[in-house]
């Protein structure tokens, strides 16, 4: 994907140094940030980062009588538990499966039946192979195995193709429904937003909606243009989710705390403001470097710039996705 002013590859090359250290230290404070910074001098920085991130404790939050949120070493995981088997949304980072399995076993004797991938990124699919070895199926959007089977570069990191044992065992194109443990689970494809593999997972009885990385609660999101991500799609995804939710819906982001509809609306408003400002500058012929230097989001940074990405990187990423 080439841009007239600055290609994604050039941007990754130019920002890899800060992406490797400062950005991820910003993203993962304390132990996780230190682990990432140390990983930059390792022979295999991705493996070193995974090992460090896997040390992050898993936190447990009960959402309903059958739904539990597990958060910590990777994207937010939601577990539907009952006598018909456990259904798990996203699978955390490599190295944490024993701890994750321990939490799942503590919920009861029912087998792990299914894992659902909200999208292809490593912090959401890393333990797919372990789930398959435990007897679970893997369900994802039809684009997910395509992306997982290819090498990728993201935020200065180079990821090889995933092993065959980590691939989804079942895919769908637009929608998919299943019922288990008294809950109806509705899956729906989200047109390219964070990536081109994004889905939403709606537990209708419990009124819990998992949006994967189309929603970063309280922080600027990552947009992956290398696999179809774009700012317009992120806004459209937020619009769709707002229509799906009620004031009582518990909305699970890919990263950040559980939210409500009002928080999602604030996130959507921020994205629209970002688009308006960056598009105006881009249309006026300002280069990516000039836009970053202009600090067009300075008034938003105090609220949104303390999470996954530092403000300058988010501006660059969002600009390149327009």
Image (spheres, rainbow, N blue to C red):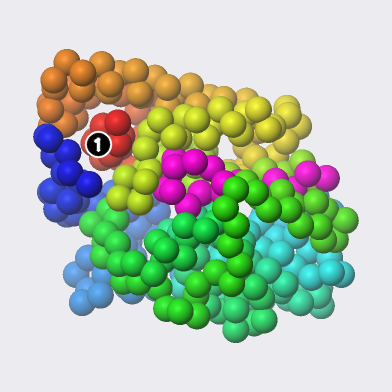
Q: Nearer the viewer, residue 145 or 203?
A: 145
Q: Which of 189 and 311 is in front in this view?
A: 189
Determine which quarter of the picture holds residue 111.
Answer: bottom right
> Residue drawn at (45%, 79%), measured in percent from left and top?
164
The answer to whether residue 282 is left or right of residue 223 is: left
> Residue drawn at (13%, 39%), measured in percent from left and top?
6
Is 191 covered by the magenta stretch?
Answer: yes
State the image coordinates of residue 45 (x, y, percent, origin top left): 26, 70
Q: In which quarter of the image is the C terminus?
A: top left
Q: Few, some or many C-alpha atoms within 10 Å of disc 1 (few <14, some 14-19, many ≥20)?
A: many
Secondary structure beneath label 1: helix
Q: Name the residue under label 1.
A: 320
- Find the residue positioned furthest to the bottom: 133
> Residue drawn at (37%, 46%), measured in percent from left and top?
228
The answer to whether residue 24 is left or right of residue 72 is: left
Main secondary structure along the magenta-highlighted residues:
loop
Q: Is residue 304 visible?
A: no
State the image coordinates of residue 114 (x, y, percent, origin top left): 68, 69
Q: What stretch is highlighted in magenta?
A: 189-205
Q: Which of 121 and 298 is in front in this view?
A: 121
């Amino acid at each position: 994907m080439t841009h007239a002013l600055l290609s994604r590859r050039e941007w990754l090359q130019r920002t890899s140094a800060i992406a490797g250290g400062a950005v991820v230290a910003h993203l993962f404070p304390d132990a996780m940030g230190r682990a990432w910074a140390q990983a930059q001098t390792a022979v295999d920085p991705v493996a070193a980062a995974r090992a460090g991130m896997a040390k992050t404790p898993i936190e447990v939050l009960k959402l309903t009588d059958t739904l539990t949120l597990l958060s910590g070493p990777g994207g937010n995981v939601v577990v539907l538990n009952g006598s018909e088997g456990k259904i798990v949304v996203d699978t955390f980072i490599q190295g944490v499966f024993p701890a994750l399995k321990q939490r799942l076993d503590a919920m009861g004797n029912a087998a792990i039946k299914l894992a659902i991938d909200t999208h292809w990124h490593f912090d959401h699919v890393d333990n797919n192979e372990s789930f398959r070895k435990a007897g679970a199926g893997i369900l994802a959007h039809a684009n997910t195995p395509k992306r997982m089977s290819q090498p990728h570069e993201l935020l200065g990191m180079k990821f090889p193709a995933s092993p065959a044992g980590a691939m989804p065992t079942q895919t769908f194109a637009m929608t998919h429904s299943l019922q288990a443990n008294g809950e109806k689970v509705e899956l729906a494809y989200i047109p390219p937003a964070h990536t081109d593999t994004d889905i939403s997972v709606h537990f209708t009885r419990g009124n819990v909606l998992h949006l994967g990385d189309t929603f970063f609660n309280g922080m600027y999101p990552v947009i992956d243009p290398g696999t179809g991500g774009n700012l317009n799609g992120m806004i459209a995804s937020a619009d769709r989710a707002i229509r799906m939710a009620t004031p009582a819906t518990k909305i699970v982001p890919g990263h950040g705390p559980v939210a409500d509809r009002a928080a999602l609306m604030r996130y959507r408003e921020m994205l629209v403001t970002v688009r308006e400002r960056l598009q105006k500058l881009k249309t006026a012929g300002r280069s990516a470097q000039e836009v970053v230097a202009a600090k067009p989001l300075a008034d938003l940074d105090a609220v949104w710039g303390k999470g996954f990405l530092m403000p300058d990187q988010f501006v660059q990423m969002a600009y390149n996705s327009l």
